[in-house]
Amino acid sequence: MNKKPISRRDFIKGAGFVLGSSILTACGPGAAPIVVKETVEVEKVVTATPAPTAAPEPIVLDVWWNSDMGNVAYLREVQEGWKQDPENEYFKKHWNWGGLAVVKFLPFAERHPGVDFKITSHSWDWDLRQNQLMALAAGIIPDTTYGEAYVNEFVQLGVFNPVSDNAAKQFPEGTTRGATIDGKVYGLPKSSGADVLFINLSLWEQAGLDRNKLPTTWEELVTAAQAISKINYSEKWGNTAYYTYGPDPNTYGTAMRILHWFNQNGAPLGSDLGVPSANAPKAAETWLFHNELMWTSTESLIQQAESEAGSGKLFNDGVIALKPGWNNDATSVGEGNIDATAIQFPLPPGGQPATIVIGNDIESPLKGGKHPELGIALIEETVTDPEAQAWLADNAGIWIPALKSLLEQHATYDRLGGYKTDTAKRIVRITMDALLNGNAGPLPGWPKNGARIWAEWNNTYLRIWKGRLNRDEIQKELDALQATIESLVRKTG
């Protein structure tokens, strides 16, 4: 029978063995054998073979953001292929958000080895709010999110983690007020903007006004608008001077261009935390002043639906002489290389400076995310990064940085490559000053039913403006608006 040979490994795996050792010397005939009586017991020897060690799974931060930017690998692909060119495939797919994402997120990944991202977009405005509420209800909670006018609603729901005081202090108070409650700040603005008054200086002078004496009071502003309206006529639009958006129940954007007048006059529509004051004592007189401005242009101009770019073109073309605008408006206004400037808003008697933050895109960390501490770190490290803060103004235009350290440079700030003319850059620097020093603040932070409240505010605006209501009629409208808002902030749904 052939026996299978036993390998050394199989042998060592045995239950152990005893080795008897007999040493035979050369024996001649008659020599007695020499026997060494020694036994050696050998313990069982087991050699452990280590199992392959799996690489640890990366920590994946679920980031809701302005564009679908995927993970670190994709961000590196974008970095490699990115060009600031409308024909570039990554620019086409992500617009300027792609370039910002590379600047913003890749340095964080390098500082935090083993961290990856899932960066996804969830729309804006009302749609974003709905998506956030549905995610919370379903328990599918990201690590960070973003937003503008509805941020305060989620702050009041208690779903965000606060950021550190040190991080919050790097921004003007007005940019974080919409994310603040009880002294704690629950988000930071990656970009911002502020309203100022745009003035077409050519039309100003054609009306016999001195470009070196721009208005500082409401009375001076109304008088100037009326003087311009008398001499400024076009066949399509009639006599025109002042412009702001007409009422649109589908957006809070109209309020962003109007409510600074009420804040100046001590008659805010509501508090930062959504306590309504629509019928405050000076609210009716503010609406009367606003109507005087509005009726220096025709109804057809006010209700035209040409967007910010369209109204910028009308400003360039001399149809509009005066308009509240933010840094985004400077993008289109600057295209005409028009003789124009901007100032902070004229004041009512006894009033104080005020402007509304606009384009103030706040990023917040959530308590219920899988990695809450890393979510806080992501917000604090990336939003306070001066390179990330400077990127949009220098490439996209539209926004300005929100960091104090950059706004403080407003007089000579030159990272404004997204704004194509000296006129536009000059106006943008004025918006930077307004954001830093102009008593900027957010829209009221309604705790419930924000969209319905803004719709009712727009409907009230429509009746006051188109009806050319007197003080008593306006007060009745405002009393009704106050009652409606009080009902809506208590009502679920």
Image (spheres, rainbow, N blue to C red):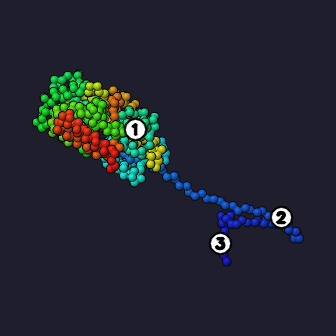
- On the question of residue 480 being in view, the answer is yes
- The earlier-in-sequence mark between 3 and 1 is 3
Secondary structure at numbered mark 2: loop
Q: Nearer the viewer, residue 421 or 296?
A: 296
Identified by mark 1, the residue type is Thr
- On the question of residue 71 being in view, the answer is no
- The earlier-in-sequence mark between 3 and 2 is 3
Q: Outermost residue toward the left? A: 235
For the point 58% across and 58% down, which residue is it?
Answer: 51
Disc nearest the viewer among 3 and 1: 1
Residue that numbered label 3 is attached to: 4
Q: Which mark is residue 180?
A: 1
For the point 32% across and 37% down, which residue is it?
Answer: 270
Identified by mark 2, the residue type is Val
Secondary structure at numbered mark 3: loop
Mark pair 3, 1: CA separation: 81 Å
For the point 34% across and 45% down, which residue is it?
Answer: 490
Residues at badges 2 and 1 in contact (C-beta under 8 Å)?
no
Position of residue 63 relative to residue 41, above or below, is above
For the point 41% across and 50% down, which residue is it?
Answer: 141
Q: Tell whether 330 sits left or right of 447.
A: left
Q: Which mark is residue 190?
A: none
Q: Nearer the viewer, residue 480 or 111?
A: 480
Within-10-Å neighbours for mark 1: few <14, some 14–19, many 20+: many
Secondary structure at numbered mark 1: strand
Residue 477 quadrant: top left
Within-10-Å neighbours for mark 2: few <14, some 14–19, many 20+: few
Residue 402 quadrant: top left
- The earlier-in-sequence mark between 2 and 1 is 2
Residue that numbered label 2 is attached to: 36
- Pinpoint residue 487: horizontal percent, then vertical percent: 30, 45
Identified by mark 3, the residue type is Lys
